[in-house]
Image (tube, rainbow, N blue to C red):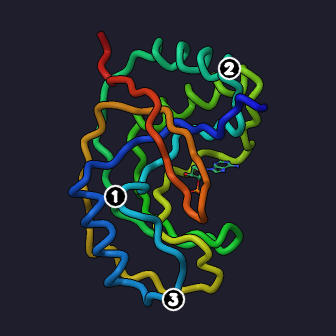
Amino acid sequence: MSDSRRLFFALELPGDIQQQIIQWQATSFPADVGRPVAAANLHLTLAFLGDVSADKQQALAALAGRIRQSGFTLTLDDAGQWLRSQVLWLGTRQPPRGLLQLANMLRAQAARSGCYQSPQPFHPHITLLRNAAHAVPIPPPGFSWRVPINEFALYASEFSRGRTRYTQLERWTLNEQ
Ligand code: 2AM
């Protein structure tokens, strides 16, 4: 039996922001545009690791635990659609330096540990709808959520009974001490 799991590092969003995002999504797009991501599953991926063995997970977690940097504020003020991946997303027009630094570090650690990393530049986003195959008008962002980010986490993605579930495995605080 394989001991590997599908893992990723991500930022969690506070519960109230998750609810507000769901509300914006539900009132901004017709119900048949795509498959909404559940509130509890809304997150911003920093580094996707793919299928990782228990040993490699431990090594990657140890490396993540050595990261020293401050928290930052994420401003969610942008939205868009990628037809190729059929995803409708929420994002930021100006990614804070801390976000890019953290994602770059985790992606570099993953690549050095042998996890495949896409050569595409990091495009921070929160997926709101999947299977959004047809272009839809995106309403002008009448929103601008400022989200204080003080930690990041390692997640496992599991698919069972037709549902994707993300389980937080470990988390780390962002402070420069
Ligand atoms: P997505 O929301 O744009 O699909 C768990 O699946 C998380 O990992 C999601 O945020 C997903 O991004 C991301 N993810 C899945 N496969 C990926 C890949 N091959 N490269 C980068 N990110 C991926």
Asked if 36 appears above or below 1 in the picture, the reply is below
| CA–CA distance in space, label 3 to label 2 | 40 Å
Q: Is mark 2 within 8 Å of ligand 1?
A: no
Q: Residue at x 49, y 32 (%)?
A: 154
Mark 3 highlights which residue? Answer: 32
Q: Residue 55 occupies which quadrant of the picture?
A: top right
How many dots with numbers? 3
Residue ID for mark 1: 76
Report the amino acid beneath label 2: Lys
Q: Quadrant of the N terminus?
A: top right
Residue occupying the point 32% across, 15% down? 176
Using the image, determine if residue 67 lies above or below residue 33: above
Which of the marked residues, 2 or 1, is nearer the chain's N terminus?
2
Nearest the viewer among 47 and 168 is 168
Q: Quadrant of the C terminus?
A: top left
Element type at marker 3? loop
Mark 3 crowd level (few <14, some 14–19, many ≥20, 10 Å Cα): few
